[in-house]
Amino acid sequence: MEHRFTGPPFTVGIEEELMILDPETLELTNAIEAMLEASGGGADEVKPELLESVLEIATKPCASIAEVARELPALRARVGQAAAERGLAIGSAGTHPYAMWEDQRVVQRQRYRDLVAALRFVARQELIFGAHVHIGIDDADKAIYVANGMRVHVPLLLALSANSPFWRADATGMHSTRTPIFRAFPRVGVPPFYRDWEDYVERIGFMVESKVIDDYTYLWHDVRAHPNLGTVEVRVMDAQTRVEHTLALAALIQAMVRELAEQFDAGLPLARCSFEMLDENKWLAARHGLDGELVDLPSARPIATPDLIRRVLERLADHARDLGSIDQLAGIDDLLERGNGAARQLVVYEANSDFAEVMREIVAKTLPA
């Protein structure tokens, strides 16, 4: 398998899946083709997803968080303006609070039609929205090491990013309803542990040779090596309503990756964590967000999720300063102090039990001021 793990290291790219909405009813609208036409080219920046009511924006690989902090808000503003010019609106959250998947159309693209043909209902009901962060890596074995090491951080990132407490006009009791919905897909969740690049190539190659997948991009794990792009991609996060929270999560991920890359360069082995506990912590994060506890894996003791995150932040602060991302990392403090997106949606809903009010708040906060 060819790869592009050649550096430069710690570049940052962000992908966000956004809602296309009717500005009056705030219902999802099957209007991706109009939005693509309005984008004026830039096929790498504005893309379709599985459903016609979903729009993906993607930054180019940026040398720093400061650079991506200029590009991502500009992309949101651009698609917001294009939507307004066509009588549409844009919103960002992990789920639409009251949309029905039965009302959504599949895009006219062969990959996605083949996906629906293969997965049937499982693909059709995937009306969810995520944020993906890519960090550049300069060595193939290092990429596998980093992806392995990032597994322990998946619950922290999910707790911070949880932004989907509603599904089909129901308060689900989950902070990230997107998580169990996506879990119905094959090849998702906490990824397997790979010994090194050779092990990864052999195991993925076996799957391709067996014709169960066309290539590694049909692995949708929470973290994955991305050989074509030369990155480690973190995919566990719900889409963020506020762009500063997406940027804060990207800054945190970049610092986490740098720490792991330095451990690899120093020849340090990763601490081995059982899949069962990694998966259990992820469930706790999806259920409770920042309001619950996770298991501190070295001590096997419960710890308040914000306390664990603050401990990690303290350890990573020097990495963030070296990377020039300490200002963006401050957005994590805002999430810890004022609540993740799910908590904020719940506050709006509890005032009047009005899902439309929740959607108006989402739309209002999606576009940069």
Image (cartoon, helix red, strand yellow):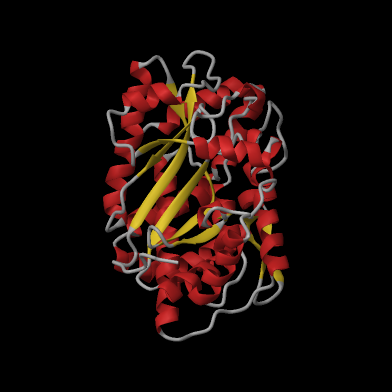
Q: Quadrant of residue 99?
A: top right
Q: Residue 238, image x and y in percent?
A: 54, 44
Q: Quadrant of residue 323?
A: bottom left
Image point (46%, 53%), residue name: 332
Q: Nearer the viewer, residue 319 or 152?
A: 152
Instruction: Please indicate whether residue 5 sits to the left or right of residue 349 in the image.
Output: left
Quadrant where the image shows the C terminus: top left
Image point (43%, 53%), residue name: 133
Quadrant where the image shows the N terminus: bottom left
Residue 358, compared with residue 338, is above or below; it is: above
Q: Nearer the viewer, residue 166 or 218?
A: 218
Residue 189, compared with residue 143, is above or below; it is: above
Q: Residue 70, image x and y in percent?
A: 27, 45
Q: Residue 6, image x and y in percent?
A: 32, 69
Image point (38%, 31%), residue name: 367
Give the number of callouts: 0
Image point (44%, 80%), residue name: 264
Residue 54, compared with residue 63, is above or below; it is: above
Asked if one can make out residue 351 in the rendered structure from this viewpoint, the answer is yes
Asked if one can make out residue 302 in the rendered structure from this viewpoint, the answer is no
Q: Residue 26, image x and y in percent?
A: 53, 19
